Image (cartoon, rainbow, N blue to C red):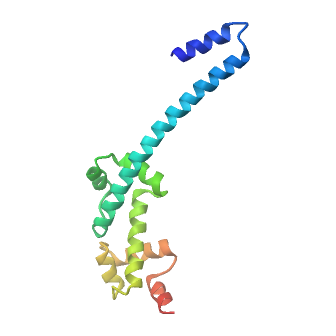
């Protein structure tokens, strides 16, 4: 509040040099800018810690397909906070991140020929419905699983 009072007094005085007002405003803005970015940096580092915890949890429990509320509880953050941090760090929602990670794992397993059927792959990745898994795979990759197998054999 003192800053506003000082600025107000400078502006009320008729013979105040405009350069003095500008210098004071510049100094004030520099302090505000420094304080803002210091708090923003702290928030980003805290967010990074939460995001890394999220990624580790997802990797460790990928085939369990954990609920977002469960992950948030394990990380001791709210679901809103988790959503905000994951979106900020990855550009994806937590659900989209998990789905993307599941499809990446499916592609890896197909590439390394670790699975023999779509049904088996779906169950290994925690999907109860192989047809849903197939539709999701196509939606994300633009190819059917059979088409993906075929591309690998070329």
Please determine whether, in this image, residue 112 is positioned above or below residue 97.
below
Residue nearer the viewer, 44 or 114: 44
Residue nearer the viewer, 72 or 15: 15
Q: Quadrant of residue 121?
A: bottom left
- Residue at figure coordinates x 33%, y 88% from the top left: 116
Q: Quadrant of residue 93?
A: bottom left
Residue 63 position, x and y percent, is: 29, 70
Please determine whether, in this image, residue 16 is positioned above or below residue 85.
above
Please determine whether, in this image, residue 89 is positioned above or below residue 40.
below
Residue 23 position, x and y percent, is: 66, 22
Residue 99 position, x and y percent, is: 40, 66
Residue nearer the viewer, 57 or 3: 3
- Residue at figure coordinates x 52%, y 76% from the top left: 142
- Residue at figure coordinates x 31%, y 67% from the top left: 62
Q: Quadrant of residue 55?
A: bottom left
Residue 78 position, x and y percent, is: 33, 45
Residue nearer the viewer, 146 or 92: 92
Judge left or right: residue 151 versus residue 58: right
- Residue at figure coordinates x 42%, y 41% from the top left: 42
Please determine whether, in this image, residue 89 is positioned above or below residue 65.
above
**How many numbered badges does the structure rendering display?**
0
């Amino acid at each position: 509040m003192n800053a506003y009072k000082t600025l107000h007094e400078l502006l009320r005085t008729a013979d105040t040099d405009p350069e003095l007002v500008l210098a004071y405003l510049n100094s004030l803005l520099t302090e505000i800018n420094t304080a803002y970015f210091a708090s923003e940096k702290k928030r980003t580092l805290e967010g990074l810690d939460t995001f890394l915890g999220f990624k580790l949890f997802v990797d460790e429990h990928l085939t369990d397909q954990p609920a977002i509320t469960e992950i948030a509880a394990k990380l001791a953050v709210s679901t809103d906070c988790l959503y905000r941090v994951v979106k900020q760090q990855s550009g994806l929602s937590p659900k989209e991140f998990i789905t993307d990670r599941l499809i990446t794992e499916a592609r890896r397993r197909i590439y390394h020929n670790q699975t023999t059927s779509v049904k088996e792959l779906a169950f290994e990745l925690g999907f109860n419905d192989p047809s849903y898994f197939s539709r999701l795979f196509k939606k994300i990759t633009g190819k059917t699983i059979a088409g993906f197998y075929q591309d690998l054999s070329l």
